[in-house]
Amino acid sequence: MKRISLLAIICTLTSLTLAQNFDNLMSKKQIDCRDISYNSSIYFIKYMQENKLDSAKALLQYWENKCGAREPIYRAKILLALIQNEYNDTLLQKGILNNIFNYQSRMDMIKHSNYYPYDMYTTYFGFIPPGQEFDKYTQHIAKSLMQRYKPDQTEYLLTEFYGENCDTLLYKLQTNSYHQSALTEEYGNTLKHYLDLPEYHMSWITGMWIPTGKLNKLGIHPELGFQMGVKYKKMNYDIIMAIKFLNSPNAYYARRTNSDNSLELTNHFLGGHIGIDVGRDLYTNNGHEFQLVGGIAYDGFDALEEDKDRNLNGESISTYNFNIGLGYRYYITNTFYLGLRAKYNVVDYSLNNVIDFTGNPVTIQFIIGGLENALKHDNLKALGYKVRK
């Protein structure tokens, strides 16, 4: 009986001890990156103000080891290196553009007093609230460093960016004012990647089909159609479909080759065109784009309607079509344009003997079109690059 009582006492004491240990664990505060980042930012300012630069450098390394390479740490490391005259391109590790975009977003929040993005993406912004002590102090450091450098130096660009103007850096990188550096190289490579992405193209066409030579007896006809394809770098590849309509103003003779081979006077005309167009940009500037265009197509028109009373089949004319010309586009926006195009068409409408005359028509077309690739356009906009406008 005594053994049972002793065992019960031991079990009770053990349970109480374990409960107390769990209480300690459950009530003990776990330090996370929110606390580490806040305290590190305060101590960084303190060390810098006391000129304890080695301590500030060690603190930034500790902060990065605990919380990862966040934008506020990256910013502080660059500014500290500039102060110690230890700046070099190795600090601009791959991914610098992400930190630039991050800082611009931070400044936009401050400018518009809209801190909702920070509340939603606290980790992305390094657990440092925008517009408070750390941001103000790094801006102060950057401004004080600007006078050390010439405007064409990368160091000046960085101090200006972090100090008083974060809106011009991406535009300045598009000029040839700055020497080759990790910053200009990454910007150039990223820009090229998105510029090289293809864009999907669609346009509506209206215009005039103007015959030449003996074919001019058919008269001028309006034309309607559309194109769809892709634009890749300076090249444009499209499938085109169009119709030309209205009866001919002059009567002409056509032969019923599928019936009695008789000639018949007619003014009927309804044509079609389906083919592939290829264009090459010759000159582009500020929304203006000039192209050399050409293509191959199947072309033709209906000359005689079916005559059921006489049991006669309808007759159509068909031919190859090789065409070449010039095109012009004016981009109202980066993705929407108005255009004009003139093409000379090499055809032979007498191939199937329905008519005995031919000529090489000219087409003049007015075009309303657009290009789309959301991934390309959104990223180029973020990079501060204006595709066409």
Image (cartoon, rainbow, N blue to C red):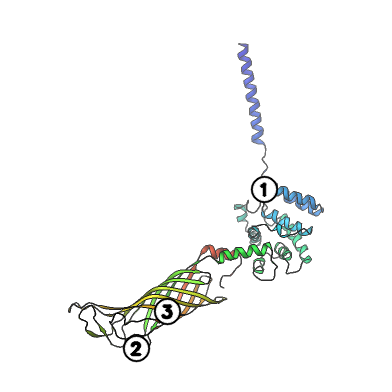
Separation (CA) of disc 2 from disc 3: 19 Å
Q: Secondary structure at mark 2?
A: helix
- Residue 355 occupies quadrant: bottom left
Of badges 2 and 1, nearer the viewer stands 2
Of badges 3 and 1, nearer the viewer stands 3
- Residue 141 occupies quadrant: bottom right
Q: Which mark is residue 287?
A: none
* Vertical relation: 82 (above or below) 237: above
Query: What residue does disc 2 label?
Result: 214
Circles 2 and 3, Cβ within 8 Å, touching? The answer is no
Relative to residue 218, is residue 147 drawn left or right?
A: right
Query: What residue does disc 3 label?
Result: 323
Relative to residue 321, is residue 42 drawn left or right?
A: right
Which of these two is toward me, 78 or 136?
A: 78
Pick whichever of labels 2 and 1 is earlier in the sequence.
Answer: 1
Relative to residue 376, is residue 240 drawn left or right?
A: left
Query: What residue does disc 1 label?
Result: 67
Quarter of the picture containing the C terminus is bottom right
> What amino acid is found at the position of numbered circle 1 in the picture?
Cys
Separation (CA) of disc 3 from disc 1: 63 Å
> What amino acid is found at the position of numbered circle 2 in the picture?
Lys
The percent coordinates of residue 97 (x first, y second) are: 64, 60
Pick whichever of labels 3 and 1 is earlier in the sequence.
Answer: 1
Circles 3 and 1, Cβ within 8 Å, touching? The answer is no
Separation (CA) of disc 2 from disc 1: 81 Å
> What amino acid is found at the position of numbered circle 3 in the picture?
Asn
Dot 1: few (<14), some (14–19), or many (≥20) neighbours within 10 Å? some
Q: Residue furthest top?
A: 1
Dot 2: few (<14), some (14–19), or many (≥20) neighbours within 10 Å? few
At x 76%, y 51%, the residue is 57
